């Protein structure tokens, strides 16, 4: 059977980075087995829908390069792929469950349910709508036919609940966790259809997975307890033979290693825990990896190793390599710590190996926003020159702006401590030599400057920092001679002349 997997998020807010990892594992598994990766939008919880969340999910997948084979707007043979467009399908199957005696109508009001819950808690227990008490509730199992017909004719709102039989063992095999079992006496009669005509996650999920021919369900471990009800639903429909293989992924843990990573951790620690930034009506702003200057491939590489290990020492892997190496059997059961320093390390590696054109595509917009004018050829040279010093693409502008504009702030103190008459003379001579150079390249520049310093007998430490500060404003930076070449002969001479005057005036004052 051809492998078919789905990523099925709910558009109730920004897509957490853990959701991206779930999508990634589904994608890798599908591509590893030449199957299909399907995007399904599970939007049946109408009270929790957030405007713009569906587009955010799609944009996030697009940014990291996990493009679905089937889904909303894309289409496919098993659509629609948005659950709110499949309501007639769910009603048909829910009615069939009632007809077969596998489910029933429940007319209990919210007040009645809350009262039952309060009584159970007062007695020291927890309320569970189940075989133990269902006949004492207002449902079709506890009503005679005349009463039931009247309730329906009156238009009394009702839900449809799954009838969970008592004293049953519900077992299934999980590709990550092995054999898993639940006792039905600990399961409630889950609501399958709400009074508003919308299905709950449990019903819609099972029907869609069956009709969309899903072969493997790869999802977070928070859904593990729900799987018992899902197994019962497959059996109620008579779909056991086509039931997918389940795999429940381990949690992504906080940087401390204690507890599940949440958006509050991002706020508290100032780190991104979402793929893209998210702003909603001025109420909420969440940091995204894209806006933090991360490359999509680095994010995928980092996420892939949060729970999965190829069994080798290799850490840097392209998406194609991840596909070739991926298997469910190598996913661990234990949660993985979200190590942001490791994420930055991955990003640094990807930046160093990226082309200048790719980096310019990601970072060039910031130079435009800053109002800097630049020659694209020179920009590509500068980016290629400094990329080994960059951790994220947002650092390109502050690290290289001086190649395209004069600086206005200077680290004067370390220069003035060593500045004297001889320093000024050598500095002035170097300006003249640079201005007269017929070939202005890093190698020639290095020879001219070093020869003059050697001839004068002054230390390199007395001149090099002064040259760098006059040109860039700071005492640290990439190779000085290549920096001089890229700034350009005319601009270098101008800045050094101004620097000489600046040092002299500050020394006198």
Image: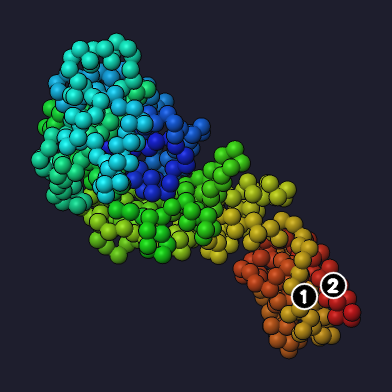
Q: Residue at x 37, y 63 (%)?
A: 257
Q: Position of residue 436 (x, y in %)?
A: 79, 68
Residue 492 visible in the picture: yes
Residue 168, located in which quarter of the rendered image?
top left
Judging depth in this view, the residue of 141 and 465 nearest the camera is 141
- Please tell me in which quadrant of the rendered image residue 467 appears: bottom right
Is 157 placed above or below 219 here? Answer: above
Mark positioned earlier in the residue sequence (2 or 1): 1
Location of residue 371 in the rendering, given as x and y in whole percent from the top left corner: 73, 48
Q: Nearer the viewer, residue 86 or 226?
A: 226
Q: Which residue is under mark 2?
A: 502
Q: Circle 1 is placed at which residue position?
A: 412
Task: Judge by depth and name the residue closer to the eye, 113 or 398.
Answer: 113
The numbered mark at residue 43 is: none
Contact between marks 2 and 1 (CB within 8 A): the answer is yes
Spatial CA distance of label 2 from label 1 is 9 Å
């Amino acid at each position: 059977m051809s492998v078919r997997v789905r990523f099925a998020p709910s558009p109730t807010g920004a897509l957490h980075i853990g959701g991206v990892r779930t999508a990634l594992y589904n994608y890798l598994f599908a591509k590893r087995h030449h199957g299909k990766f399907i995007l399904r939008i599970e939007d049946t919880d109408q009270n929790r829908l957030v405007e713009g969340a569906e587009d955010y999910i799609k944009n996030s997948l697009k940014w990291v390069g996990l493009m679905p084979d089937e889904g909303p707007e894309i289409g496919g043979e098993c659509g629609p792929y948005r659950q709110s467009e499949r309501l007639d399908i769910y009603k048909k199957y829910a009615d069939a469950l009632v007809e077969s005696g596998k489910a029933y109508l429940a007319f209990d009001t919210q007040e009645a349910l809350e009262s039952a819950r309060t009584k159970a808690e007062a007695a020291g227990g927890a309320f569970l709508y189940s075989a133990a008490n269902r006949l004492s509730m207002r449902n079709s199992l506890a009503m005679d036919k005349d009463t039931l017909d009247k309730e329906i004719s009156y238009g009394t709102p009702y839900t449809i609940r799954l009838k969970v039989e008592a004293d049953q063992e519900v077992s299934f095999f999980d590709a990550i966790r092995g054999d898993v079992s639940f006792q039905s006496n600990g399961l409630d009669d889950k609501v399958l259809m709400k009074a508003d005509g919308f299905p709950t996650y449990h019903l819609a999920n099972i029907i869609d997975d069956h009709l969309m021919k899903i072969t493997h369900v790869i999802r977070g471990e928070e859904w593990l307890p729900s799987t018992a009800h899902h197994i019962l639903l497959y059996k109620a429909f008579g779909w056991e033979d086509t039931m997918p293989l389940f795999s429940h992924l381990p949690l992504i843990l906080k940087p401390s290693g204690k507890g599940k990573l949440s958006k509050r951790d991002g706020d508290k620690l100032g780190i991104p825990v979402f793929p893209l930034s998210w702003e909603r009506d001025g109420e909420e702003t969440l940091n995204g990896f894209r806006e933090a200057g991360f490359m999509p491939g680095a994010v995928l590489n980092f996420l892939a190793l949060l729970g999965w290990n190829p069994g080798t020492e290799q850490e840097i892997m392209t998406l194609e390599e991840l596909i070739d190496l991926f298997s469910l059997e190598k996913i661990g059961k234990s949660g993985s710590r979200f190590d942001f320093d490791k994420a930055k390390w991955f990003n640094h590696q990807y930046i160093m190996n990226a082309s200048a054109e790719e980096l310019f595509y990601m970072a060039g917009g910031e130079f435009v926003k800053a109002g800097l004018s630049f020659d694209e050829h020179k920009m590509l040279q500068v980016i290629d020159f400094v990329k080994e010093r960059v951790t994220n693409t947002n650092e390109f502008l502050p690290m290289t702006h001086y190649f395209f504009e004069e600086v206005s702030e200077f680290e004067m103190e370390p220069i003035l401590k060593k500045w004297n008459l001889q320093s000024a003379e050598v500095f002035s001579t170097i300006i003249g030599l640079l201005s007269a150079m017929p070939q202005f390249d890093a190698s020639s520049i290095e020879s001219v400057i070093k020869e003059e310093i050697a001839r004068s007998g002054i230390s390199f430490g007395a001149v090099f920092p002064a040259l760098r500060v006059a040109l860039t404003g700071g005492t640290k930076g990439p190779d000085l001679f290549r920096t001089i070449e890229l700034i350009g002969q005319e601009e270098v001479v101008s800045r050094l002349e101004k620097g000489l005057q600046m040092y002299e005036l500050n020394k006198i004052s």
